[in-house]
Every structure is written in C-alpha cells, then in structure tokens.
Image (cartoon, grey):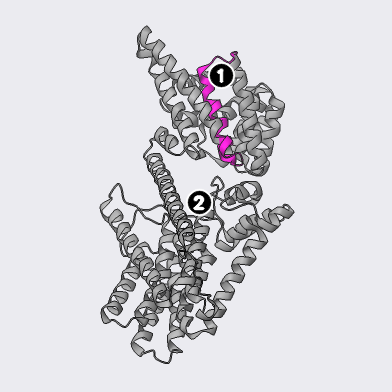
Amino acid sequence: MFGFLTLLSLALLYWFSVWNLSRDEIKNYFKVVLISGVVSGIVFLVDVLFSFPFLANPLGGLSTLVAFLGLLVPIALFLSFHSKKGWEKIMGILIIGFFIVLIAFINFLVGWIVLGVGAFASLVVLMNHKNSSRNWVILPLAVLVLSILWPFFKLTPIYRLDIPAEVSLGRSASFGIAQNTVHSGIKSALIGSGPATFQFDFSKFRSKSLNDNPLWQVRFSQAHNQLLEFWATVGYLGAVALLLLVALAVFLSFSYKEVRSLLPVWMALLAVGWYLTFSIPIWLILFLLLIYTLPSSMVRDVKLPLGRNQTDSIVSSSIFVLGVVAVVLFLGFLSKVYLADFQFRGGNYEEAVELNPAQSAYHMALAQDSLQRALSIADDLGSSDSEEIQQKQAEIRALVSSSINNSQEAVRRSPNNSALWQMRGAIFRDARVFSNPEDQFAKDANDWIVQSLTQAIELEPNNPSLYLDLGLAYEAQGDTDLAVEELLKAVDLKSNLAISRYELGRIYYNREDNDEAIDQLERSVILNQNYANALYSLALAYERNDRLNDALILLERVEELNPDNDSVKEQVKRLKSLDDSSEEEE
C-alpha cells in the first residue's frame, strides 16, 4: 500500500507540475532534493562520529545512501552550470565536494560506479555544449578520474567505519526467481506477484543451489536491481512500461537542447537501477526528471473552471475542505505508523502493536517477547513462596496465551510469509515446556507445530531448515518414519548441514539401526569436528558395535569441549574400565 501511495503521489506531482509550472520553477524541485541530500549526509556523519541515539542514516542502507549521493552529483553540476548567480555556482561545487567526501567515507563500490557514470556523461555533454567553458569540463573530468582510481587501487575509506557488510541477492539468482515468478501463471506474467512481494517470490522460487551459499539462511526481500524487482512484482506489463517510459524520456533528452544537460542524471539513474532497487528518494528523482524532460510544446495549459458562480465556489470550497481533511487524516495515519516503528525498534512491542496493529512483524515480535518473559518467570519459580508461585503461574499462563494469540494474528495478517509460519511453529515448540507430555495442550501443540511447518514448506519448498524442524516435530509425536523422511529431505537439500546429519543419525541410533546411525553421525562430525553432541552420539554408536577404543577417543574429545560436564567424565571413566576389562580378557 505504501508503494502504491508513493507512486500515486508522484504521479499527481507530475501532472500538477507539467500543467502549472515552468522549467525554471521546476528547477526548484532539484534544489530541494539537493538540500535534502546535504541534510541526509550531515545526519549520517553526526550519527557515525558522535553516536546520537535518535539519528541514523535517513535512507536506510549505506548502499542506497552512496547511490543517492552519486546521483545528486550530476544534478548539482547541472544546477551550477545553468545558474546565473556566482554564489550558487560556488555552493554547487562545494556540495559536489561534500558528496564525494561522503562516498569516500563509506567507500562502497556502487557509489563510485554511479559517480563515475554520471561524471562521464557530464563530461560528454559539456564537451558538446557550445557555451561550455574549460573550467566546467575540468570538474567532471576530475570526478571521473577519482571514481576510477579510488576503487581500482582499492584505497581505504577516509574514516574507518565499524559497520556490518551489506549483502544483496545476486543478479543471476534474482533473474531466476523473477523468471519463475512471471512464468507461474497468466496473471503473474501480466501483472506479477504484486508490489513489494519479492520476499514471497524468493521463498517460493529460491533454487536448491542457494543452499550451498554461506548466506543460505537469509531471506531476501528485494531483487538485485530495479528491473528484476519490477519484472517479478508487476510482471511484463510493469517492466515494459518502466523501460518504455525511461527510453522515451532519454530520447526526448537527446532531442531537445534545453533538457540535454540532464542526460548525465539519467545515465547515473540507469546505473543505480542496474545495481540496486529504487528507494523513495530515487523514485522522486526519476519523476522530477520526467517532469523536466517533457517539452513545453507537449504540455496543455489546463485551467479548472471554478469560481465562476456560487455553485462552482461551493464545489471548489468542498473539494478544498475534503482535501485538507484527507491530508490531515493521512498525516495522522503516517504519524502513528512511524511512531509505531520507533517503538518497535526500541523493543516496546505492545505499544507498536497498539499504534499499528496491521504490521505482522510487530505481532510476531510481541509473541516471541511474551514467551521469553514467561520462560524467565518460570526460571525464578524455585525461589518464590507458595503465594508468589500462584501469581507467577497465572502470569505465565497469560503470557503464553498472549504469545500464541499474537503469533496467530501475525500469520493471519501475512499468510504468505513462510518465516512467520516457521516462527509460529517455534513458539508452540517452546511453549510445550509449560505442560506435561501427556497433557492435551502438549499434544495439540505438536499438531500445531506440524501444521505451521507444513504451511511454511508449501511457501518455501527448498529451505532445508524447515524440513529439519518438521522432522523433529514428527519425532516428538512418536512418528519416526515421517521424521526420517523429512530429515532425509533436509539432507538432500543441503548435504553439508551438520545438524541434519546429527539428528538423522540420532533417530537411527534410537531405532537401533546402528550402521545407518554411524554413517550419518560420522558425516556430521566430518562437517563439524567440534560438534559435541554428534561426537557423543557417535561414541555411543561405536560402543554398541564394540568399537570401545574409537568410542573412548571421541568421548575424551567431548570432555575437552565440555570440561565441566560431570556426566561426560563418568562416561569416560566407565568406558576406560570397559576397555581395560576387554584387554585383560584378551
């Protein structure tokens, strides 16, 4: 809905501007965007250098920030070149320098690429401009050289930032997911899966090969770039419409001299679209380019015939009042939305849910938090008196009930999100500790775990962790055949996952299928030589096959990994005595 409202607002801005504003007036839009870039950069610097708790990168990811700043450089050059005021020219050059310093500060490759593309296109345009001076040619040339040499020589950032690496889905993987999405049906081919739904496309159509990637557990919510994002979420019609729109605008920029100076911005924007998905500020720049590119000969001067008489005056007044009411209501709604997000990020999940109950992530976070609070209270029961125990038990029941209800609300509001179904299953699994295995709640909880994980697998069929969880759920129900079947699927999807091999080997051991148990447990130990549980289970399997020396070696390794575990020490002593007895008999 937010994506739709954003595009609708930008479309209304487009029509209002081309009908009512001149090109010189439209330039003020670019000045405002340029100022917003300066403010964003200052806010980011203050947050990094002084760690203010209420300030952060206004654009979210650092990749988006450096791409946005690189896109603003040719805009600043365009405004400076066409300005008739000397102080505006100087200010534009200073702003360009500030943006370049920020890009060097963060030092992400995408920022240098966007900066270089814009500088190259600016250089070409200025060299073909009859009134251009050598001084203006020198500026984009210097920026181009810097954008090439800095990443080529792998120069370090100006200031070392302690920031986590940003990762995105690869272009080839994004292409495969988008292709499978649009080819899944006629509706998807025409209009895609829907705006902002790529995370569901990723879950449903992620390939098995992604499980070999170190980031196989990450669920990506965006495609690698804007074209693939559009192709998957709005289908062929949306992707072709975007391409035609941009192609038409670039063609008009070539055709009309008065808008040719914005070609570098178009080129930089295309570079952003090749490496990233568009954030709202970049969408704004796209529409501002469209507004400025449309030649005046194609614009109709439309005047609304309001105010001619009393009737028209009443109509116009009514429209104005309704508009004001709509704006106030919308801004009030947005205020609640952003306040809810602020509360959520601060860990105040109940307040976030009250302010914005439509957000499924808030309900699931509240569900997990309620369950953790219940577990924490349960740990303190031993140190309480009888009256306190009753009060705490009542509080635990209320928290568990709240956890289950909020997890149900989360999947109700976002039924296509496999991650939420998996988390719902985990909540029921952890909630079983508050009941006896023979209680009805424990039996129902097992059924709900299986149902939740089955739904998650339907939405994300190539995720091995879901089959692992489902296998363990079937084992808890006592159905080891189904447990083995699901665990084998997990192993097939990701053969190098040590925990799947361990759980499979453990079930084989409990079923007294010792050869299969040893095979799986040995594979698990090979994958993780410090996996204490797998080492311990393999030692028991070796002991069952009378390989006492091998079992003793493994148990001694487990003792090294768990030096404070008395039960392991007892097992080592017991096995040593058995080994000594067997040697004496020989």
Nearest the viewer among 476 and 583 is 476
Q: Is residue 348 magenta?
A: no
Residues at marks 2 and 1, CA–CA distance in whole angstroms? 69 Å
Would you call the spot at circle 2 few (<14 residues within 10 Å), some (14-19), or many (20 or more)?
A: few
Compared with residue 60, is residue 76 higher up or lower down, i.e. above or below?
below
Figure quadrant of residue 450: top right
* Magenta span dominant secondary structure: helix
Figure quadrant of residue 155: bottom left
Task: Say which residue appears at 57% left-offset and 47% top-offset.
Answer: 216
At mark 1, the secondary structure is helix
Identify residue type, mark 1: Leu
Identify residue type, mark 2: Phe
Compared with residue 570, is residue 162 higher up or lower down, i.e. above or below?
below
Give the magenta range.
411-439
Dot 2 or dot 1, earlier in sequence:
2
Residue 529 appears in the figure: yes
Nearest the viewer among 154 and 315 is 315
Residue position for label 2: 2
Q: Residue furthest right?
A: 186
User: Which mark is drawn over residue 578?
Assistant: 1
